[in-house]
Image (spheres, rainbow, N blue to C red):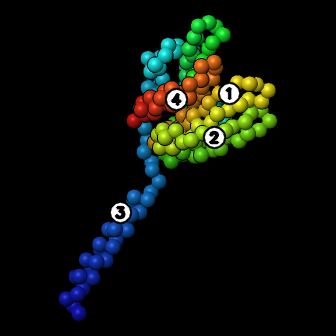
């Protein structure tokens, strides 16, 4: 009986090591970006077509809701690029809104459903497959014939929501731009 004591300790030790490894693998992902938020912003050179930067700015706590801050918002930034095709009436706009959250919180904002209401109808599109989690919508505003697109994704502790509006709304190219935005997050 005394000879089996070291074998029992070995088996118990192996079970403990396995339990620690399994629990570590099941922990919530807590990776954090090391990229400066301004370096995540799209540049005019990132676009295949001739887009011009119209506006860019840091977001402060005054620019986001109290609820967003309570859910772990740390900092934000946005850009607006436009492409004026042949004349001033053919304008396409891409907005990019970037937010950095406490680890484990960015996915929560992707999971929020955009629900149709009296102002707009939201039709969810297939998963664009960008970042850790992503969703896309075609939006039809009430009392308007025009539609626009929303694409939102998370990667590590970064959440981005992007909008494509205007006369030349190529959703496939929009997804490619979102891929470029996602690749800037490290």
Task: Tell me which corner region of the image, top left, top right, bottom left or bottom right, holds residue 67.
Answer: top right
Q: Earlier in the sequence, mark 4 or mark 1?
A: 1
Front tag of 2 and 3: 2
Extreme-left residue of the structure? 3
Q: Earlier in the sequence, mark 2 or mark 4?
A: 2
Could you say whether the residue bearing mark 3 is in a helix, strand or loop?
A: helix
Q: Earlier in the sequence, mark 1 or mark 2?
A: 2
Could you say whether the residue bearing mark 2 is in a helix, strand or loop?
A: strand
Left or right of 59: which side holds 118?
A: right
* Residue position for label 1: 147
Q: Earlier in the sequence, mark 3 or mark 1?
A: 3
Quick one: quadrant of the N terminus?
bottom left
Q: CA distance from mark 3 to mark 1?
A: 49 Å
- Evaluate whether residue 185 shows in this view: yes
Residue at image coords 48%, 23%: 42
Label 4: how many residues lie within 10 Å, few (<14), some (14-19) or many (20+)? Answer: few
Label 3: how many residues lie within 10 Å, few (<14), some (14-19) or many (20+)? Answer: few
Q: CA distance from mark 2 to mark 3?
A: 38 Å
* Residue position for label 3: 21
Left or right of 83: which side holds 2?
A: left
Residue at image coords 57%, 16%: 82
* Residue position for label 2: 124
Front tag of 3 and 1: 1
Q: Position of residue 158 (x, y in %)?
A: 50, 38
Label 1: how many residues lie within 10 Å, few (<14), some (14-19) or many (20+)? Answer: some
Task: Pick the residue in front: 108 or 120.
Answer: 120
Q: CA distance from mark 1 to mark 2?
A: 13 Å
Q: CA distance from mark 2 to mark 4?
A: 15 Å
* Residue position for label 4: 172
């Amino acid at each position: 009986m005394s000879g089996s004591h070291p074998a029992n300790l070995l088996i118990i030790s192996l079970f403990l090591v396995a339990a620690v490894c399994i629990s570590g693998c099941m922990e919530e992902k807590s990776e954090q970006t090391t990229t400066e938020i301004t370096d995540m912003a799209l540049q005019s050179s990132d676009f295949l077509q001739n887009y011009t930067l119209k506006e860019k700015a840091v977001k402060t706590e005054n620019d986001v809701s109290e609820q967003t801050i309570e859910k772990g918002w740390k900092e934000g930034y946005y850009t607006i690029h436009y492409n004026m095709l042949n004349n001033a009436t053919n304008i396409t706009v891409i907005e990019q809104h970037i937010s950095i959250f406490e680890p484990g919180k960015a996915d929560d904002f992707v999971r929020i459903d955009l629900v149709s209401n009296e102002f707009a109808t939201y039709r969810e599109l297939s998963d664009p497959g960008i970042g850790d989690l992503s969703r896309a919508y075609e939006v039809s505003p009430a009392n308007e014939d025009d539609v626009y697109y929303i694409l939102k994704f998370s990667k590590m502790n970064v959440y981005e929501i992007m909008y494509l509006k205007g006369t030349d709304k190529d959703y496939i190219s929009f997804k490619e731009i979102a891929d470029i935005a996602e690749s800037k997050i490290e």
